[in-house]
Amino acid sequence: MTRAAEIRAINCTNCGAGLDVLGGGRVMSHVCGYCGSELDAQDNYRVLRRYADLVRPDSPLAIGMTGTLDGVAFTVIGTLGMEESWHGEYWRWVEHQLYSPTHGYVWLSWEDGHLVWTRKYRGHVDPMWISTDRVEAAETRPTAYSRGVRFRYYETTDARIAFVEGEFNWRPRLGDRSTSVSMLADGAMLSYTGSAVEREIELTTYPDQAATLAAFGADPRPRPRRVHPVQPMPDGGTVRFLVTWGLILAVFSLVLGVFMSALVGREVLNTGPIPVARLPAEVTFELTDTRRLTVIEVATDVSNSWAWLELSVTDPEDEPVFEVGREVGFYSGRDNEGSWTEGSRRTTFRFHPAMPGTYTAELSVPESETWQRGGAAIGQVRMSVTEGRSSGFWLFLLGGLFILVGVAAALRRGIRRRARWRGSDWVDEDDDDD
């Protein structure tokens, strides 16, 4: 017998509360949200049983809300609070039965801050059924195929009903149990679900969270911290594009950087050794290349000592170009691991000349000091100037950034993959989750 589809409201035959009838003509039971009575929708809503003191689980959805999934209008008609326990641990989630006059009955579940959409799957699946016994006997992670997609075993769930309210196209009872063997692919999950009365294959997908909540008029919820297994992976084609082109552009940048660094330029000054006693000293040099860099290198003879160098440069119009101070230091010795050295006796200054002509450099050593008794204080300096130098620094940096883009894309996909499979109960450590 099928209940008349035109009924829109009833009064609970136990407590008299007004109840909306939302689920169409195939509804079999209606659990009153006021007194907890289960009513037989196929037999004048007579009372079948009562559930007292049920605590409604938290969910952004409620019975009577209407929204769209994949362009189809659905109404929330029933709510189940589900529970699974294992060795003292509990997992809880909420399943809402939805109804559409054109597309029938589906489930929209609230799990760990995620909405997931489940409906019966009518496509061909190979194998047609995977039982818990088959999973337990398997030496490798079981797989299933449907429409060219490979699904791999994720988990087995033994769930019980802990809360029930609203209309259903079957007769759920408090404490009823069902077992699901879940198989995961990218962005979808197939579940072989069996209970005491039926077996079904169901498909679960991940709708747009904010859009779905908004479509049903539900309040926004904070973004969950954990990744849900059916959350879509970052697009594989995009990741391959970023990795491939990141590598290509990185190689191009690095090769160009090496080429630019190989342009050694032309030496325009080499002072030879200058005793520190003669400092500060001024030297002049002629520059003609204003397109590329000019490099000033100062070499010292510090040994287990350090010195503070100050260098100022003025242009042909006697205007300051730069004035800078820098420390040089070189240290060496032996320890139980052998000989060691640290620091450098040289330092380099680079600038881009604005005009050709005669430039003046002034070098001084206002401060120096030895390290330990074996140190030798600075005794002399040597200055050289080279014009027309090119630097590959920015190209090397750009190449590094291209590499980071590719690595970040691949790493993000790898992290998401691991996060999706983290909840799997398959324990073979050698298995490669994909």
Image (cartoon, grey):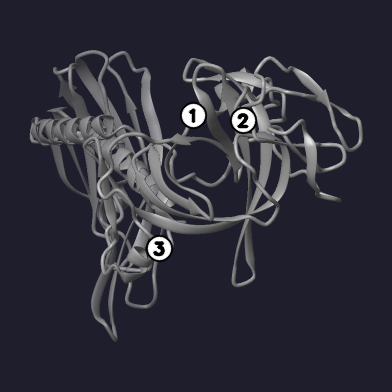
Q: Quadrant of residue 17?
A: top right
Q: Secondary structure at mark 1?
A: loop
Q: Which mark is residue 104?
A: none
**Residue that carries the numbered disc 3 in the rendered image:** 132
**Residue that carries the numbered disc 2 in the rendered image:** 1
The answer to the question of whether label 2 and label 1 lie on touching residues, with beta carbons closer than 8 A, is no
Q: Residue at x 68, y 14 (%)?
A: 6
Q: Secondary structure at mark 3?
A: helix
Horizontally, is 25 left or right of 365 in the view?
A: right
Which residue is outermost to the bottom? 336
Which residue is outermost to the front? 1
- 367, 216: nearer the viewer: 216
Horizontally, is 169 left or right of 380 in the view?
A: right
- 185, 44: nearer the viewer: 44
Which residue is outermost to the right? 15
Percent of width and height locating residue 62:
72, 30
For the residues labelled 2 and 1, the Cα–Cα distance comes to: 35 Å
Percent of width and height locating residue 11:
86, 26
Q: Quadrant of residue 222?
A: top right
For the residues labelled 3 and 2, the Cα–Cα distance comes to: 35 Å
Q: Earlier in the sequence, mark 3 or mark 2?
A: 2
Q: Secondary structure at mark 2?
A: loop
Task: Give the residue type at disc 2.
Answer: Met
**Residue that carries the numbered disc 1 in the rendered image:** 207
- 70, 307: nearer the viewer: 70
